[in-house]
Image (tube, rainbow, N blue to C red):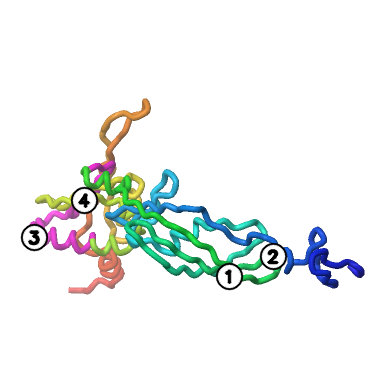
Amino acid sequence: MDGEFCVVCGATGRRLTDGVCPECAADRTTLLSVPERAVVVICPHCGARKVGAQWERPGESPLVTAEDLVRFLRVPPEVGVRRVRWEETSAAGTIRELTGTADVVFRGVPRTVEVHLSVRTEHQTCTDCSRKSGRYYTAVLQLRGGLERENEKSRALHARLDGTWTSLLGECRADWRNAISWREELPEGYDVFFTQTLAARAVAKLAKQRFGATVKESATLFGRKDGQDIYRVTLCLRFPRTDPTVRARDAARPAVEP
């Protein structure tokens, strides 16, 4: 409004909040801060990060990254962070000293802010890696051949199933692959053990859709926890010898008269 002025700098014609223009408010406000000491917990086997009680981002780098640091930024409600650049200033053992230079905007006013963060790295084995090392599993996928009448030699069967499994893994989500604990070779095919039943079911569904596999599920009682029965699930996947796309193409061909 006409006649109003910033009580700090005396400027007029500017949008005021509580009598202070955005520029002066930015100068008088802590636009960004960090805790005195930060801790990043990393699984040394898979790179997962422990955030609170949960493990996240398996498959990440075993080193502290910018994504690990950004969650320690304390950002006031009216501040927008555009970009943060981190520079390591010193390191001693598991302690790293870093300076973050952030481009922020406060009430439409751009500012560059520096913060100094001390980060300690801790290594803990995540739940999934601990389970895998102990051969823990909740579900098993049985990779088997089809039910064709003619017999398939063991070496050819294993080569075919191994190739199909490799192709299937290439289409799986990362969290499904991370749930795989180990694989065993058997005369009749392979058994693949999972630490998460939902991931095993998702892979079985994908195998049915993409490779024409038939799926048969069964469950066995494994134990009890918190008064509830715990089951291990077995999913038998039978992969027909002929690729489903080839079968569809052959079925579409016109019959040849003798």
Q: Residue 103: which disc?
A: 1
Part of the protein shown in magenta: 136-165
Left or right of 130? Residue 149 is left
Image coordinates of residue 196 in percent, x first then y, are 32, 45
Q: Is residue 15 above or below residue 202?
A: below
Residue at image point 70% right, 62% down:
28
In the rendered image, residue 242, in percent from the top left (x then y), is placed at: 21, 63
Q: Which residue is mark 2?
A: 26
Element carrying mark 1: strand
- Give the alpha-carbon distance from disc 4 to disc 2, as whole Å: 56 Å
Q: Are marks 4 and 2 in contact (CB under 8 Å)?
A: no
Q: Earlier in the sequence, mark 4 or mark 2?
A: 2
Q: Indicate the amino acid at tag 3.
A: Arg
Q: Identify the residue position indicated by label 4 in the image.
A: 182
Q: Nearest to the eye among marks 4 and 3: give it.
A: 4
x, y percent for residue 24: 74, 66
Q: Nearer the viewer, residue 199 or 179?
A: 179
Mark 2 Cα-neighbour bin, 10 Å: few <14, some 14–19, many ≥20: some
